[in-house]
Image (spheres, rainbow, N blue to C red):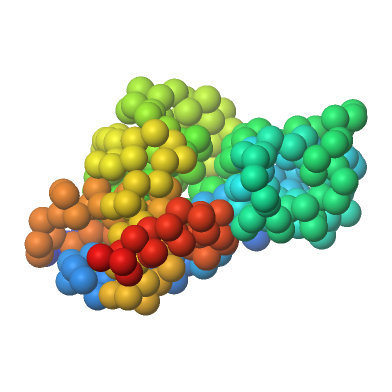
Amino acid sequence: MLKMSSGSKIDWLDVEQSLSHFWNSLPAEARVVSQWTPSRRFSELTYVREELLGSYKARKYLSLIPWLREQGFERIRVAGSSHSGNVTQLGLLLRQNGMEPVYLFEGRGGPPAGNQLLSQLVYGSSFKTDSGDVDFEIPEGGSHPAALAGSLGLAGSLVEKSLEQNTWTTRIFMDSGTGFSAAALLLGLGFFNLPCRVTIVSMTGQSSEDIQDICHSLSGDYGRLFDKPPRIPEFEVNHPPVGPSFGSVPAASLAEVAAFAQQEAILIDPIYTAKLSLYYQQQRVAGQEALMFLSGGVRELLCFQGPLRKWLEQRQSQ
């Protein structure tokens, strides 16, 4: 029997067998279990350290990159913001797998910094000028049906780590951009039919209906992997308490980045993880155990050197 965070118990034998079936239905590369770190500030909270793997997108690529290779594609366009860590990471992975990444410049202006600067190393001249023919264009955020198998590992990782910890936590908090990883988490958790409530904080203004639509669009791919229809656990979608416009970096986000660095000894990004943390703090119930995903770390933080420098200067002058 496995103890739940609420104190009740569930029969774990069927879940353990389901976990074996789950992993066997996915590519072997998808079986990646993330590290968990207890919060130093909130005794009831545990962090799921996806940022150590390279954000949720790293899981997408575990199945997307092999699919691209199987299709025989050689020249791939990467879509996204020029300062995105995804652009840098994906370009490197494509090169490692013998494909040529190209990118049509969509920069912000001003001197390049952070990932925009790193991406110039990866893409070369195509980072600014290439608009020629490509074999395939990866959607922004890497959100493509071929990425589902890798992204489902988000749920498998939670269940496997719960086995190690001998507990199941029913309250789960996650940030979301395109909504693809959030939908994959819901689909994966539904496979196990464990009691839970997933709170999704959308940084792009999505609604519950939007996430439902993404789940529906992926239901056929899910069925081909597991040979059964998907089941969606209880979830809600909310917006961040600060900086609701995507890409905005309010002072409260930077203050939370500093709080994480100083009190949690973890570097996080100000767009996704910091805003998710601020939402959690508004909603937290002391004593009710919860899991919170950390999706962005050092690589994402590189993009915000200017705002971070200005915020630090203002704080030091006070």
Residue 207 location, quadrant: top left
Q: Quadrant of the N terminus?
A: bottom left
Q: Nearer the viewer, residue 5 or 316?
A: 316
At a point 19% along the width and 55% down the height, the residue shown is 281
Q: Nearer the viewer, residue 76 or 219?
A: 76
Q: Nearer the viewer, residue 113 or 20?
A: 113
Residue 154 image point, x, y percent: 47, 54
The answer to whether any part of residue 222 appears in the image is yes
At a point 85% along the width and 30% down the height, the residue shown is 131
Residue 147 image point, x, y percent: 62, 43
Q: Quadrant of the C terminus?
A: bottom left
Q: Is residue 35 left or right of residue 45?
A: right
Q: Is residue 11 left or right of residue 47?
A: left
Residue 26 image point, x, y percent: 60, 51
Q: Is residue 230 above or below residue 198?
A: above
How many numbered discs sit on the rendered protein?
0
Residue 271 image point, x, y percent: 42, 48
The answer to whether any part of residue 55 appears in the image is no
At a point 19% along the width and 68% down the height, the residue shown is 42
Q: Nearer the viewer, residue 130 or 14?
A: 130
Q: Is residue 172 left or right of residue 164?
A: left
Residue 143 location, quadrant: top right
Q: Is residue 274 left or right of residue 30?
A: left
At a point 64% along the width and 45% down the height, the residue shown is 110
> Can you name the residue that lies furthest to the front here?
317
